[in-house]
Image (cartoon, grey):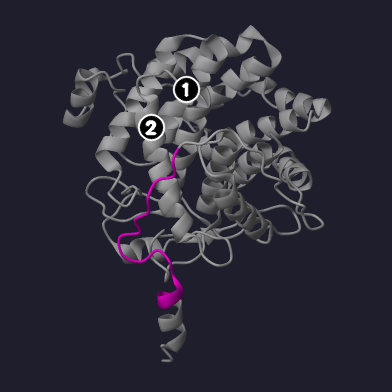
Amino acid sequence: MNILPRIVLLLAWPCLGACTHTPVAPGTPAKYAFGPWPAGAAPQDVGRRVTANFLARPRHMTQTQSGQPPVIHYAEVCAWYGALKFAQGTDNQPLTRQLVTRYEPFFGTEAGLVPKSLNVDCNVFAALPFELFIETKDERYLPIARQLADGQWDNPANPAGLGAAAREAVAVGLSWETRFWVDDMFMITMAQTQAFRATGAKKYLDRAAHEAVAYLDKLQQPNGLFYHEPAVHYFWGRGDGWFAAGMSELLTSLPANHPDRARILAGYQKMMATLLTCQDANGMWHQLIDDPMAWPETSCTGMFAFAFVTGVKNGWLDAKTYGPAAQRAWLALVGYLDADANLREVCVGTGARDDRQYYLDRPRTGGDFHGQAPLLWCAAALLR
């Protein structure tokens, strides 16, 4: 076996070892001229194609929970949210109407696909009807959205079945869904952040911030990245991607004088600084973020690019440093789109396991909403 290419790659990889980097000091919003884009790579064009792909799918992606009937999958919810934000960013009213109309069966024939408040994967559905209310002011969306957002803190259907970790979380004001898996940070805080955006009720923002700080304290490592969960010492790409996206969304709505903002911003900037050193020469991040032997993975690349773009646009990150990195990531992602706007090289859904080979061997797929969603988030953020 010729080991020279591997040796060269290892020497060139900037993120080996501790992957440490000094956090960037808070900045002020600065314009960065994302683009110009090659033909077909402009966010308007890519977002339009990916949204058309979303609308053309005849069936919903579903998930099942504990023997319950199938309900809409959280990944489709996230893609739908991204499509709405893209349509909003392009001021495309006909496209917005199509995305709004797609929800109508959930008030009738497809009502059974609306999740109940069972866990984080179900409750993040709230982000979608809250967004539809924000855009349409149609109050029909509010009951189910509020029920799910409040369900993350209200007594669950089976309180006696709560594990010790959930009981400890409730005792300190956290969601009963708290289990300290890295992706749950997005699922919990996104529902609460959207609830705040839709209703203006401060309790939702306080919940989201309190939860984010708890996850930062529990999971963020000295190098700025996050273990999949406390007993699994690997930096899984999409898992960290959920955290990066969740902090980006929360910081967008968190006031400057909120008591938890400084802690969350510091954690976000620490993570972004390390991610900058882990991006490969082609603009991608890998299935295991700090492992150059791991394969380039598109869903985490989309999430990290979204976090970079959002940080640059809001002045949390230095535009001259992070702007070009975000642009490289976007162009790399566009190269993974097939003719039907399906994003390739997406890791399938992945549980936590303290086994490096397990992550390296996870199957890859194309067109999965886990990849389509962050691509739409990026397109919308670039146009914001």
| Tag 2 secondary structure | helix
Q: Nearer the viewer, residue 232 or 140?
A: 232
Q: Please provide the residue range marked out in magenta.
A: 10-25
Overall secondary structure of the magenta stretch? loop
Instruction: Name the quarter where the C terminus is drawn.
Output: top right
| Left or right: 132, with 78 as reference point | right
Q: Which residue is mark 1?
A: 254
* Amino acid found under the numbered disc labelled 2: Ile
Q: Quadrant of residue 80?
A: top right
| Alpha carbon separation for disc pair 1 and 2 | 10 Å
Is residue 178 among what the camera can see? no
Q: Are marks 1 and 2 in contact (CB under 8 Å)?
A: yes
Q: Count numbered badges in the picture.
A: 2
The question of residue 23 being in magenta is answered with yes
Instruction: Name the quarter where the N terminus is drawn.
Output: bottom left
Give how far across and how far down residue 311 sits, in percent.
54, 39
Mark 1 / mark 2, whichever is N-terminal: 1
Q: Which residue is mark 2?
A: 264
